[in-house]
Image (cartoon, rainbow, N blue to C red):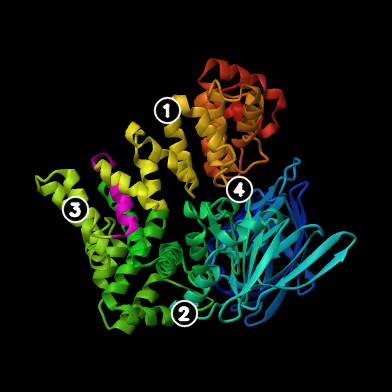
Amino acid sequence: MKHLLYIVFLLVVCIVHGQHQDKVNFIKGKISLGIHPKNKSIQGSVNYSFTALEKVDSVFLDAKNMTFLSVLLNNKKVKFKADDQRLILYKKLKKNKTYTLDLNYKVQPKQAVYFIGWDSNLPNKQVWTQGQGKYTSHWLPSFDDMTEKVVFDMEIRFDKDYKAIANGELQDTLTVDGIKTWRYSMDKPMSSYLLAFAIGDYEKKELFTATKVPVELYYYPQDSALVAPTYKYTQEIFDFFEKEIGVPYPWGNYKQIPVRDFLYAGMENTSATIFSDAYMIDSIAFNDRNFVNINAHEMAHQWFGNLVTQESSESHWLHEGFATYYALLAEKEIFGAEYYYWKLYESAKQLAELSAKGQGESLLDPTASSLTFYEKGAWALHIIRENIGETAFKEGVNQYLRKNSFKNTNIEAFLAEMALVSGKDLSLFKEQWLQEKIFPFSVAKGSLKKGSESLLELFNLEQELITSQVNRSIAIQKYWNKTAVPQFKSHLVKTYYKSLPQELIKEIFDSNDIVLRQAIAIAAPEVPVGLKDEFESLLEDHSYITIEHVLYKLWINFPQDRSDYLLRTKEVVGLPSKNVRILWLTLALLTKDFEPHNKAVYFKELSGYTAPEFGMEVRQNAFQLLWDTIGFSDNNLLDLINASQHHSWQFKKFSQTMLKELMGHKEYRKRIIGLSEKLNEAEKRYIKNNLGAE
């Protein structure tokens, strides 16, 4: 009998798992969370109100590996089943009746919540979430299906010495016995994957947009000097979007929070973007790698993805393509039209190369790559805007957003709106830009020629170099003076450096143009003796990438002057990845006659950068340069094994690949196996199962 009942139960579970739950509508969710970083756990409760649209016998929520302490429906116990994926309620519900569901639970999330620094004495201890692609249901009984939109309130309990930031508006706080409670509320519905919180040691700068929307810019207390360059143009981007899109910002307030070792560049959680603190930069780093594009991309998502959400992954273009395109429009507003068209050109080249390899992808393919969704998606919007005209495009986007606000939709609905306002047949556009796998580079090239005079000149130069017998240097010199656009000249330097006349190279040095001087620092394979002084002047440029490249090349080409180069750059740290400092330490250790009394100090510093207390970009730089030059200490090996279990898949993959290579060297293999007693269980298991160590 028990066996038969079990079979019946499995059938019920399969049926529940297979439905889209379109017969119930969840309306409001009131969340309360106690965060416990020491054991990486959450004790929470959530009160849902929902309506049964039809008679149903069961309701489910996505809930990964949770223990439920109580489950109440309309304040009464209800029969339920919780497995490692879902909570299933068994109760006959009446049509059009509204119910309340109270859940108390505890969970140790396997993903989607990241506890940074709590198992050691690391600085900048944090807790933060990432829902998209990871599922909020790892820490909250919720809805992996993004078509279920709910108005969420959230309260968080944590140590009063930290700040907790979440979606919505902060209503109030309360501190009792050292534990502080932050209460956030929202008044509009959203998908569960956009729920988020971040906890850490933060200060904030507040500004107000042209329409009086409060914007909170968070930063670590020690990074106050980085606020202005990092968040530069934030207000301009926000004001531009409201004007360009024509739909007011829908979420009341907006927050941006940097976190350590984030999985991506940024994530557009509703009203609360979380981004990698590797983008917290100073005014010099702004010239190399700034936050402007990421800032604009995540902000654009507040309309495209958050306000109007895809019905299914086949319509993912409505999120990433739109956010990428509108970020480009914001950069066009800030940096000019030529900047915009050159960004399009760079992505067009990448997409064309992908097509040439037979790896082109349709924008309707739910498994397509980020390059397709983001860059080809932006191109598709650029083309449709050209085809139907700017006025119709803006009107169509405006109507599309207003008709579908706080709802889910699909690509067909967007195209229908654009066809309606423009009166044009968009079937060819859909076939060529959305359905077709091959990127139509010739069409893209035609658009670039019309929009950018400097790109027209580039294409003319490329044609002349192919078809004409004219000397390459003469042709480049002729086109060089046809436009002053820095992207054009930088491209010529990087592509045709070996063909540049020396007098032209000297002219670039004399121009003091940071972009062009950086292009030379990157493109030059070596430093000619006749240009030694000019290349040395690059060590003073306001570009950490320039300094990194030219320091190494000067060190290689002029051994007699190595100590001088090191002294001139001794105080330069560089980007958040410490690109210049880590290179400098390596070169200082390799330069025999440079400060021999400090060698041990320099090795200790360089070797120390592989430790978990540093961000993953710093650690990766240190691992790579140590492996390429000096080799690893036992502590470095332990740090590498630790990194092989990192939560960031990119850094984890890098570390695991390097470990595998080290295990191929007899001496390193012996040392790694000898360190096994110092490893935790997960590290031991990885070494044994994946690297063949006993």
Contact check, label 4 and label 2, Cβ < 8 Å: no
Q: Which residue is mark 4?
A: 261
Q: Position of residue 1 (x, y in %)?
A: 69, 52
State the mark number for residue 243.
Answer: 2
| Residue 48 point in image, percent of width and height | 70, 72
Image height of 249 relative to 90, above or below: below
Q: Hey, what amino acid is under mark 1?
A: Phe
Asked whether the residues under the numbered discs 4 and 1 touch, taking CB atoms below 8 Å apart as contact, a structural biologist would say no
Find out whether the residues at labels 3 and 2 contact each other: C-beta distance under 8 Å: no
> Callout 2: helix, strand or loop?
helix
Q: Which residue is mark 1?
A: 558
Give the residue at x 44% y 42%.
537
Q: Nearer the viewer, mark 4 or mark 1?
A: 1
Q: Is residue 494 visible?
A: no
Q: Position of residue 114 (x, y in %)?
A: 66, 50
Badge 3: residue crowd in 10 Å (few <14, some 14–19, many ≥20): few
Magenta-tinted stretch: 484-500
Of tags 3 and 2, the one toward the viewer is: 3
Left or right of 585: which side holds 442?
left
Q: Is label 1 in a helix, a strand or a loop?
A: loop
Is residue 166 one of those drawn in magenta?
no
Q: Earlier in the sequence, mark 1 or mark 3?
A: 3
Name the quadrant containing residue 89.
bottom right
Q: Which residue is mark 3?
A: 478
Along the line of sight, the residue nearer the viewer: 564 or 423: 564
Q: Nearer the viewer, mark 4 or mark 3?
A: 3
Q: What type of secondary structure mainly makes up the magenta span? A: helix
Which amino acid does the dot numbered 2 rest on? Lys
491 inside magenta stretch: yes
